[in-house]
Image (tube, rainbow, N blue to C red):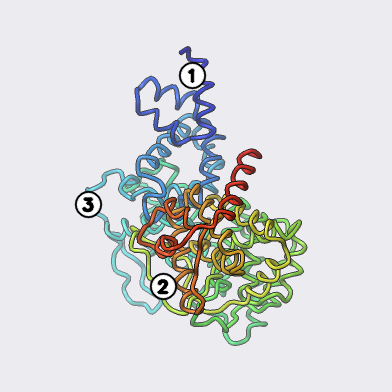
Amino acid sequence: MPFPLNRVVLNALAEVDFLGTLMLASVSSSLRSFIFEQVVTISILRRFLCEHQYALFHDTYDHLFSNQEVACLHQAFEELRKRHGESLYGKFVNILAPLLGRTPLKVFQNSPGVTLNIRIPNPPDHKGRPGGCFTFSDACFSYDLRLFTSFLHHPEYMHHGGQVSQGFYDFHTSPANIFLRKNFLFCKRYIDDFNKCVQLSILASPHLDPHLGLGKTPDKDNCLLLDGVKKIRETCAEQGLSLLLEKACIKGALHIYLRPRSYRFYQHEVSLHTFLSLFDLPEWMEMWTPAEFGSWYAIGLSRYGIEGIETLIDQSFKNKHEMLIWLFLGAHTWFHETEERIEDEEEVDSRFCCNMITIGFESEFVNEQMASITRDDRIWILEQIIRRASEFQICRDLGANLFNYFVVRDLAEADIMLSVLIDEISYSRLQYLFEYAISIAIDEYRRQNQTPLEFKAAKRFAEKLMRKNMNLYILLTGSGVDENVELQVDKRRIVDEDNN
């Protein structure tokens, strides 16, 4: 086959199966050169990483993507980096971090397995006690903290879990630092940005330090919080930071207060008045994307309920369909548990996501909106949420929220809703995580309801499930089959395929 035709065929394959195309590069050296020189482009790699950024971010199982697939992404990015140089970083900075997090630390090391002689004195602590020395073990620990969890996708991580000692900052910027393969995946530039945002979100406004708290006079201290946000924005402008990093600094500083924690849920460190005042700040409404508005408003609904938040929602979204999609994709702490969950033993490691929250004030608004639309609209919204999850799902519990608000909200339509839900997740990179989240929702439903869950049509989708030891699979393998609901699900799938 002539090379020009090869390019057409491989470009077409890359559009529908980018990772499959990269896998072909291992067949021969000539094919490898051709694929990386003629097929892999900035736009196609960027699109893939963008569309799968949260699938990579949530891959604490290490098999939402195989290690071979991750290695292929490394190769593709490195080939582009060698071709385009430093300018490539700006095109990928917002979506690169999940790939860094899915990469073992040893891949970033110049000499993996070799213990380096590192001893850098740390300054005394805040009580004047000796700070000890920063050692090789500290370097491994600190770089793992910096690379494992994306501060752009989980901003409160900067101040809740991502803290490192002063010795790390000195070591990282030292010309003698031979620990890191600094250019690989632009890991040093990314860590530089991480460090800069951590320092800025604290130092630009010290009263935002989460260890200090906001005291017992919320209105007074909340005014300081607003001043702190203004200071962050001014400092970002002075230092020429991008809008992406400016928003990360703001979210890192605020989310630590706005994300409710069960043991202090009623201690509203940020008052409703102050939360609403954020949206009156100059250019605030122009800063955020629909997905980011969904996250802000999901926080607002969870903490304060409908009052005030509904007006902002009406201003920011075109219709209920768009609003519900972005709220679900942007919501943390919407899944409420009465008992500690059974943690997922399949995870290699876990990122901090949501503490156990027993209550929230969002349910009234969400249930009203769900009841105000037709069943077909609810099905369409459910499908859209799942299809966009790999790119926008910020919370690991999304599957639990979908089960609660779409499946068991109305038991009369629960069977078809669960059928659609399983059918959709079976095509998603996040299926493994979805099955766990739905299973813990089944546990919680059983704790709070005497009515047994019975599904008939959904039974035939049981074999599409990956995790045979989870509640979802166990629940389905004991039901009968409703052929009428089966037919409806099949028709929707055919219509969707025709439209695409």
Cα distance, mark 1 to mark 2?
A: 52 Å
Q: Quadrant of residue 35?
A: top left
Left or right, 373 with respect to 142, comes to right
Disc 1 packing (10 Å; few <14; some 14–19; many ≥20)? some
The residue sitting at 62% across, 48% down in the picture is 492
Q: Which of pointers 2 and 3 lies earlier in the amino acid sequence?
A: 3
Q: Residue furthest top?
A: 2
In the image, residue 252 sits, relative to residue 487, either above or below, namely below
* Residue 498: % across, % down: 64, 38
Label whose residue precedes the other's in the sequence (1 or 2): 1
| Separation of residues labelled 1 and 3 (CA atoms) | 47 Å
Q: Amino acid at mark 1?
A: Asn
- Contact, CB < 8 Å: mark 2 with mark 3? no
What type is the residue that disc 2 sits on? Arg
- Expressed as whole percent of the image width and height from the top left, the position of residue 82 reads 45, 31
Front residue of 137/351: it is 351
CA separation in Å, label 2 and label 3: 39 Å
Q: Examine the rendering and report whether any part of residue 181 can be seen.
A: yes
Taking the view exactly as shown, the residue that stands out farthest to the bottom is: 216
Q: Secondary structure at mark 2?
A: loop
**Where residue 290 appears, x then y in whole percent?**
67, 55
> Label for residue 115?
3
Quarter of the image with the C terminus in it: top right
Q: Nearer the viewer, residue 48 or 421?
A: 421
Name the residue that disc number 2 marks.
341
> Can you identify the residue that label 1 sits on?
6
Q: Secondary structure at mark 3?
A: loop
Amino acid type, mark 3: Thr
* Disc nearest the viewer among 2 and 3: 2
Which badge, 1 or 3, comes first in the chain's sequence?
Answer: 1
Label 1 vs label 3, nearer the camera = 1
Q: Secondary structure at mark 1?
A: helix
